[in-house]
Image: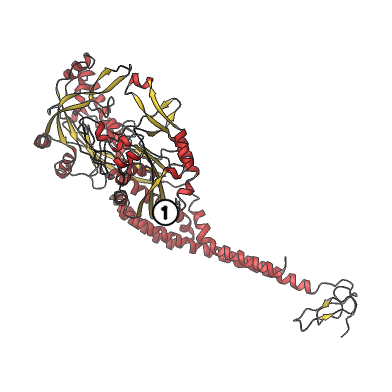
């Protein structure tokens, strides 16, 4: 290697080492230690209408009944998911409301009640069809008393002082037993089933009701008068154990007064006390996992910007397009506003691009070749007939995954930007995407959003048919000209892409909560549980990074370490009050300070190493030059030496003709004595 090239190489190495503390070593240092973070979340459990003697508080607190320690988990396996590194210590306190509070609550419920006599999906009956199929879409009407679920939640929250207030830094779970309200009895229940649903049911039941309407095309969801609990506006969730029965949670949940008589449970007996303690513990456990410390479907990633790119492919006929304008089926402003409310600390962009499927011949052929009209006898004789057009989603997903760069040239998944690509398809007639498992065909359900969309980690896949766009024309009672659009299901599936899961993962009763992530609900907003979960994990991720960096700083730069630790104390103060937005702002500052301090600290270690290495290399180069100059020329007489000084003008050997140094006495190449 020539001296000039060697020096360039040395300078390049020195520059690389100088940049390393900021670009490489910081990342390596805070990735060395597996992160682990322990946080506390208090939960207040309130019983209304429950005799304190029927609950064994010592037994209920046992770890086999209640999850006092839960782990932040991601449901999808790597690379889509992994443990979050956070351990939640859940502490429970128990309060039994007195008779005065119970009477006050019952009086309020009676003041807002509505009496209805409408088809109730739990009271279904079978009818045969000429094809031999069985239809289960026929429902008896049952007298029901309903209470506005949102009003009830707000009343409970506004009257919390009667219960010793609710924790500002935790959740409140309320379990009510109010059989004095119009409630379905064991006698009415047994009479209905003894005739195998062949006779109209008797009795009255009470429920909690909500109302939902599609904001794109105006369809009003049916059968939303039949929940048995509610929550999500505040950090509060209640469940009425005497309400129901409801089709949504059957057969797992049933009115307590029926269960007690059906199982011959005497709550005054030792067995009855144990049975009931375990019964309510199971509900508390479900609420803890579903609502208080929910799991994630994918690993959440904090980013300063989230971009939602919606591609809508219209594959309908000309007549269908004229009946429903595709532009009326989606609202990008609502998508953006919803996620801005969820993530107030990040920039949100939402765009919609309407694509003509005919411009994508290969994709069009993939869809055409994977279409069929399914008519399953197996499904038809055991439940609702499975008769509709399907497009197998897996081959379509493969095409979009393989060609993602074509649709998303600026795809990002990092701290600067997180891209959520949504591919939504409008199909003709009743056609929808479906996923198969072996021979089983998953059946989409428009009324509950099931399989109308799926979040696949890298992309979201959504489908609606012309029947969805005009759903009101196909239901009873008819809702002419009304239908369902893309906006709600796009928000739901995009919520999954950010990591959020369903509130019914650990029990269907969890679906009775305000959240776009539920199935029973049709919200366009994220509930308090969703906001807490995602904001909290974003703080946790950055906090764990800072902790990893502090492990190095504590020995190398203790003063900076102490200062940053004080900043984390401020984060903890906000975090402990569940002010996760405020905590995130502070932890980002702590992270920046830690990176800067670590870079400075590592520079103090690396620069001396650079100087030592540079000194050694420079010494080596100098020695090489000296030796080179004083090397014995070929052919020189013994004892002669050539000296290298600054050249004046070139001279040439008269013997061999090659150039020589002006100060040389002998030719370096042939050894001949040079003439002056």
Residue 649, how many percent across, how many down? 78, 83
Q: Say which quadrant the N terminus sits in.
A: bottom right
Q: Residue at coordinates 25% horizontally, 30% vertically from top-left?
A: 280
Q: Nearer the viewer, residue 508 or 224?
A: 224
- Left or right of 547 in this view: 521: left
Secondary structure, mark 1, is: loop
Q: Can residue 70 be seen by looking at this rendering?
A: yes
Q: Residue at x 49, y 41 (%)?
A: 362
Q: Residue furthest top?
A: 195
Image x and y of residue 53, in percent: 19, 28
In the rendered image, the vertical position of residue 110 relative to residue 526, given as above or below: above
Where, quadrant-wise, is the C terminus in this rendering? Answer: bottom right
- 126 left or right, relative to 432: left
Q: For residue 5, what is the image quadrant?
A: bottom right
Image vertical order of residue 524 relative to residue 430, above or below: below
Corner quadrant of residue 656: bottom right
Identify the residue at horizontal 34%, vertical 57% (top origin): 585
> Which residue does the numbered mark 1 point to in the structure image?
417
Q: Is residue 603 above or below residue 436?
A: below
Q: Residue at x 48, y 56 (%)?
A: 552
Q: Position of residue 425 (x, y in %)?
A: 38, 40
Q: Is residue 429 left or right of residue 652?
A: left
Percent position (x, y) of residue 230? 22, 37
Mark 1 crowdedness (10 Å alpha carbons): few <14, some 14-19, many ≥20: many
């Amino acid at each position: 290697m020539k001296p000039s090239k060697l020096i360039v190489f040395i300078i390049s190495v020195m520059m690389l080492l100088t940049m390393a503390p900021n670009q490489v070593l910081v990342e390596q240092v805070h990735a060395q230690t597996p992160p682990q973070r322990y946080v506390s979340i208090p939960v207040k459990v309130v019983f209304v209408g429950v005799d304190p003697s029927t609950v064994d508080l010592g037994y209920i607190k046992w770890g086999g009944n209640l999850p006092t320690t839960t782990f932040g988990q991601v449901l999808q396996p790597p690379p889509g998911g992994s443990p979050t590194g956070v351990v939640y210590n859940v502490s429970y306190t128990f309060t039994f409301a007195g008779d005065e509070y119970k009477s006050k609550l019952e009086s309020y419920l009676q003041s807002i009640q509505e009496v209805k006599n409408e088809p109730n999906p739990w009271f279904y009956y079978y009818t045969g069809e000429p094809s031999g199929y069985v239809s289960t879409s026929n429902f008896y009407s049952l007298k029901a008393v309903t209470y506005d679920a949102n009003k009830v939640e707000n009343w409970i929250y506004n009257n919390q002082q009667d219960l010793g207030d609710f924790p500002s830094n935790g959740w409140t779970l309320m379990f009510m037993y109010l059989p004095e309200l119009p409630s379905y009895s064991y006698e009415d229940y047994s009479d209905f089933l003894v005739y195998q649903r062949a006779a109209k049911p008797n009795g009255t039941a009470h429920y909690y009701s909500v109302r939902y309407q599609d904001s794109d095309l105006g369809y009003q969801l049916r059968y939303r008068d039949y929940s048995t609990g509610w929550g999500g506006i505040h950090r509060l969730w209640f469940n009425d154990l005497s309400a129901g029965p409801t089709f949504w949670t059957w057969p797992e949940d049933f009115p307590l007064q029926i269960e007690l008589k059906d199982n011959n449970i005497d709550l005054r007996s030792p067995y009855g006390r144990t049975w009931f303690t375990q019964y309510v513990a199971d509900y508390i456990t479900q609420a803890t996992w579903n609502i208080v410390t929910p799991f994630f479907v994918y690993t959440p990633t904090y980013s300063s910007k989230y971009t939602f790119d919606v591609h809508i492919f219209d594959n309908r006929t000309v007549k269908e397009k004229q009946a429903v304008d595709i532009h009326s089926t989606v609202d990008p402003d609502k998508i953006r506003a919803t996620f801005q409310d969820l993530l107030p600390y990040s920039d949100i962009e939402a765009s919609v691009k309407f694509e003509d499927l005919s411009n994508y011949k290969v994709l069009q052929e993939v869809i055409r070749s994977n279409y069929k009209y399914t008519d399953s006898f197996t499904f038809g004789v055991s439940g609702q007939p499975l008769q509709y057009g399907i497009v197998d989603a897996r081959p379509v997903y493969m095409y979009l995954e393989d060609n993602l760069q074509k649709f998303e040239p600026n795809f990002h998944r990092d701290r600067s930007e997180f891209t959520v690509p949504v591919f939504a398809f409008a199909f003709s007639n009743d056609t929808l995407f479906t996923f198969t498992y072996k021979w089983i065909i998953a059946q989409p359900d428009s009324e509950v959003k099931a399989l109308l969309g799926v979040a696949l980690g890298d992309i979201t896949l959504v489908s609606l048919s012309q029947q969805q766009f005009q759903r009101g024309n196909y239901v009873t009672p008819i809702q002419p000209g009304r239908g369902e659009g893309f906006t709600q299901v796009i928000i739901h599936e995009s919520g999954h892409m950010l990591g959020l899961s369903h509130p019914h993962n650990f029990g269907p009763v969890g679906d009775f909560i305000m959240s776009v992530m539920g199935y029973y609900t049709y919200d366009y907003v994220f509930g308090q549980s969703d906001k807490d979960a995602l904001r909290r994990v974003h703080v946790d991720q950055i906090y764990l990074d800072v902790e990893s960096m502090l492990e190095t700083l504590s020995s190398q730069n203790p003063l900076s370490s102490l200062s940053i630790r004080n900043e984390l104390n401020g984060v903890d103060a906000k975090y402990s009050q569940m002010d996760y937005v405020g905590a995130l702002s502070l932890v980002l500052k702590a992270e920046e300070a830690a990176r800067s301090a670590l870079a400075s600290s590592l520079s103090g270690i690396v620069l001396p190493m650079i100087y030592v290495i540079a000194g050694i290399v420079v010494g080596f180069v100098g020695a090489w030059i000296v030796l080179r100059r004083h090397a014995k020329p070929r052919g020189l007489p013994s004892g002669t030496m050539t000296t290298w000084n600054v050249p004046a003008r070139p001279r040439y050997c008269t013997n061999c003709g090659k150039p020589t140094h002006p100060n040389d006495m002998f030719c370096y190449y042939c050894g001949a004595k040079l003439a002056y």
